[in-house]
Image (tube, helix red, strand yellow):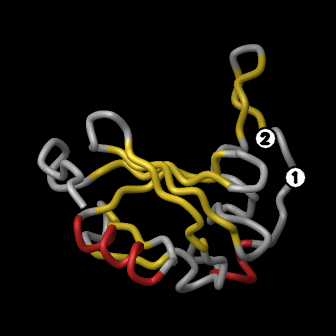
Amino acid sequence: MNLDFSKSDGLVTAVIQDQATGRVLMVGYMNEEAFRRTVESGYATFYSRSRRKLWLKGESSGHRLVVKNIQTDCDRDAVLVQVEALGPGVCHEGFRSCFFRALKDGEWTESEPRTYDPNSVYGGKA
């Protein structure tokens, strides 16, 4: 599939976008195996840099990302994955998007309400 995994320690950046609204939901990273599994399964799979392992988005929460379209940039070292998000949110802090903070007057403020209680989903392990 000719992505360039050589530039960032074997990873490509994956921008996850809601196909219906155009909103960016999250940014993750994929190695070759995560990308292959994403394409084959139709569900977004990532490589966790902190845990050093693959993870299927929604494996704990059930909030999966159904892949609708995948594009790459001109350098083939990043992908845009357009998805249908199953569940009330993508962010492990309980928000629809991981981009729920906005810079206002030099301060980061929550720009939207939580869509679910992360403690009830992750048992306080978010």
Say which element carries label 1.
loop
Query: Looking at the image, can residue 50 be seen?
Result: yes
Query: Looking at the image, can residue 123 be seen?
Result: no
Please report the residue visible at 45 percent of the width from the left and 83 percent of the height from the top. 41
Q: Mark 2 points at which residue?
A: 110
Left or right? Give the position of 112 relative to 12: right
Quarter of the figure that contains the C terminus: bottom right
Along the line of sight, which residue is nearer the eye, 97 or 118?
A: 97
Task: Please tell me whether residue 120 is drawn above or below residue 107 in the rendered image.
Answer: below
Task: Please tell me whether residue 64 is drawn above or below residue 10 in the rendered image.
Answer: below
Please report the residue visible at 12 percent of the width from the left and 48 percent of the height from the top. 6
Q: Name the residue under label 1.
A: 113
Please report the residue visible at 40 percent of the width from the left and 73 percent of the height from the top. 39
Specify the farthest residue to the top.
105
Task: Report how far apart the C-alphas of labels 1 and 2 lie in the structure.
Answer: 7 Å
Say which element carries label 2.
strand
